[in-house]
């Protein structure tokens, strides 16, 4: 079988010599994180989606939250020192991140944006994030992931 093509996310991890596991799965179009996790057998609470938001200042921010949760926009804004943050438009994801909807990874974006992971990620030594294309999930050790994305942990999800 042909060797799998590396994504920017994988190349970034390789450059930093960070060990990760790649989980490719069959998928032709966008599916949500829950379906992606089901396809590879990943636990929901350990699986995270990547959201890009724009602050009132015009800056972009990356928020990495559990697939079953919604981002708390007020908490997210506080975490990055903004008055407010709003989701970017789907049509702008590629232009801003270099990734498509459903394949947006916190790793290897066009530019390094401030990145905040929900505090619940701290419960795990490894988390699952998008691998940088639809049909690819990566299991990455949390500590090096935070370092390479210059990320921090904060409570940024809605409380149940």
Image (spheres, grey):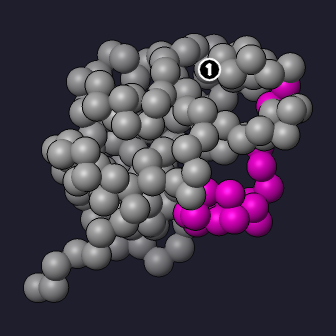
Secondary element type, mark 1 = loop
Highlighted range, magenta: 84-101
Quadrant holding the C terminus: top right
Q: Which residue is located at x 65 percent, y 65 percent?
A: 94
Look at the image and say whether residue 126 sits in the magenta stretch.
no
Q: Which residue is located at x 20 percent, y 42 percent?
A: 18
**Viewer-closest of 113 and 26:** 113
Q: Is residue 12 above or below residue 159?
A: below
Q: Is residue 4 above or below residue 90?
A: below
Look at the image and say whether residue 94 sits in the magenta stretch.
yes
Q: Is residue 43 above or below residue 106?
A: above
Q: Which residue is mark 1?
A: 156
Residue 65 visible to an observer of this rendering: no
Residue 111 at x, y percent in the picture: 58, 51
Residue 135 at x, y percent in the picture: 39, 67
Determine which quarter of the picture holds residue 56.
top right
**Viewer-closest of 150 and 87:** 150
Determine which quarter of the picture holds residue 79.
top right
Residue 77 visible to an observer of this rendering: yes
Q: Which residue is located at x 36 percent, y 29 percent?
A: 147
In this rendering, position of residue 143 left or right of residue 84: left
**Viewer-closest of 46 and 95:** 95
In this rendering, position of residue 14 left or right of residue 137: left
């Amino acid at each position: 079988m042909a060797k799998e093509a590396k994504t920017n996310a994988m190349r970034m991890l390789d450059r930093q010599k960070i060990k990760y596991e790649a989980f490719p799965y069959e998928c032709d179009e966008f599916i949500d994180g829950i379906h992606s996790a089901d396809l590879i057998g990943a636990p929901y609470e350990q699986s995270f989606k990547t959201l890009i938001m724009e602050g009132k200042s015009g800056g972009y921010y990356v928020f990495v939250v559990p697939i079953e949760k919604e981002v708390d926009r007020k908490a997210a804004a506080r975490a990055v020192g903004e008055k407010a943050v709003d989701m970017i438009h789907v049509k702008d994801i590629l232009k801003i991140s270099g990734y498509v909807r459903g394949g947006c990874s916190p790793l290897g974006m066009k530019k390094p944006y401030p990145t905040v992971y929900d505090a619940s990620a701290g419960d795990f030594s490894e988390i699952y994030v998008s691998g940088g294309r639809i049909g690819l999930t990566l299991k990455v050790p949390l500590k090096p992931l935070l370092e390479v994305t210059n990320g921090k942990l904060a409570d940024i999800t809605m409380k149940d």
